[in-house]
Image: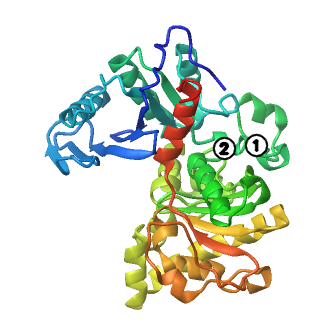
Amino acid sequence: MTTPTESTTAVTANATRVLVLNSGSSSVKYQLLDMRDNSRLAAGLVERIGEGTSRVVHSPLTAGGAGKRERIGAIADHSAALKAVAEELALDGLGLDSPQLAAIGHRVVHGGLRFTEPTVITDEVLAEVERLIPVAPLHNPANVTGIRTARALRPDLPQVAVFDTAFHATMPESAARYAIDVATADAHRIRRYGFHGTSHAYVSRRTAALLGKDPSEVNVIVLHLGNGASASAVAGGRCVETSMGLTPLEGLVMGTRSGDIDPAVTFHLKRVAGMSADEIDELLNKKSGLMGLCGDNDMREIRRRIDEGDERARLAFDIYIHRLKKYIGAYYAVLGRVDAIVFTAGVGENAAPVREAAVAGLEELGLAVDADLNAVRSGEPRLISPDHARVAVAVVPTDEELEIAQQTFALVAPEGV
């Protein structure tokens, strides 16, 4: 674990706040948390950066907060976006110049093999994150831009990178390696890295707590189902397998991503359809998955269409569930013993029909869903399996921002705080 450098200003005992930044290509999501009680002080979003119709949405979450604010106007770049974030926070007395701000935690999608723990950002660290751009061209460039901008605003403040790939670094080589020429793979960093790691880490721990056990005692299959979707097999608190690979394209059927596909499809599209590498990339990442199958990537809309008898929507749903069941079965085999299967993220937390269908027919594996429990809408972790089920089925809302904040604060806080 990388520790703060000597040039980093010391964090004082009363500095207990962490600002979490998630910088995308045209957006910045943020939350400010107080780590004394993990409470949220503010949250917001800057979107459509670089457009004339940029939008800033800010929600003060303190007792004296003035309510949600929204403004539309041109935000030229990420520097202007973070200045807008700072202005909104300052209106609530939570400015970036506050002595209570301990650090800024950045979500970074790809950390490669080098970064397997939260890391204080230095020039060397930032340069290595930039070197990883070829294996994360959709995400790391925006992450780097957000980091550079935040460091320019508060060069004296510890800034920490928390990597999506880090939780999956415990996978054995037998799971992480692809069966291609080793020299070629090593030269070009080709292996399974996995993503959504902060979610899988947080949810697997919360699931163990829900079962009243220590994470080291529990084997869990985590199903992170959002527009992006991934599965992981977690044995005793350590990831041993995950569905996403070198990039977030591999694995489950997603909103606009294909997930698993015969790699020869890409050669076929190039030879027969005359498609370029960029066109194939666009197809598989942005025009496939549920969107490619039925024209919608919103599970609520797909379910509505199914209820109206739409066969394309029904087929898309069936393909989605079929792939999900394949991974449940595969990870059951990898783990040998499964204590719980847990659903999380937007679809996993809210789409009862997905949970029901994913488990249906797996009774011989000890899996079942109670219809009444499954129908309950709640923001709290909960079991949805009947008491007699051999394997618990749970719904645990993810909290990646809290996970990033906790990992950031644990790295920079003075001992005893």
Residue at 53%, 83% (x, y): give it: 373
Q: Nearer the viewer, residue 197 or 303?
A: 197
Task: Tell me the residue that label 1 is attached to.
Answer: 170
Q: Is residue 114 visible?
A: yes
Colouring chosen for the image of the structure: rainbow
Q: Nearer the viewer, residue 21 or 271?
A: 21
x, y (%) of residue 71? 15, 44
Q: Is residue 76 visible?
A: no
Residue at 61%, 53% (x, y): give it: 200
Say few, some or many: other residues with alpha carbon within 10 Å of mark 2 (under 14 / 14 to 19 / 20 or more).
Answer: many
Q: How many marks?
A: 2
Task: Tell me the residue that label 2 is attached to.
Answer: 167
x, y (%) of residue 314? 49, 83
In the rendered view, tell whether residue 224 sits above or below residue 105: below
Horizontal arrangement in the rendering, residue 177 relative to residue 43 (left or right): right
In the rendered view, tell whether residue 320 sits above or below residue 117: below
Secondary structure of residue under mark 2: helix
Q: Are marks 2 and 1 in contact (CB under 8 Å)?
A: yes
Q: CA distance from mark 2 to mark 1?
A: 7 Å
Say few, some or many: other residues with alpha carbon within 10 Å of mark 1 (under 14 / 14 to 19 / 20 or more).
Answer: some
x, y (%) of residue 235? 78, 56
In the rendered view, tell whether residue 387 sits above or below residue 90: below
Rendered-image quadrant of the N terminus: top right
Horizontal arrangement in the rendering, residue 273 relative to residue 40 (left or right): right
The amino acid on which the numbered mark 2 sits, given as a three-letter code, is: Phe
x, y (%) of residue 144? 46, 28
The amino acid on which the numbered mark 1 sits, given as a three-letter code, is: Thr
Secondary structure of residue under mark 1: helix
Residue at 33%, 20% (x, y): give it: 153
Horizontal arrangement in the rendering, residue 128 relative to residue 350 (left or right): right
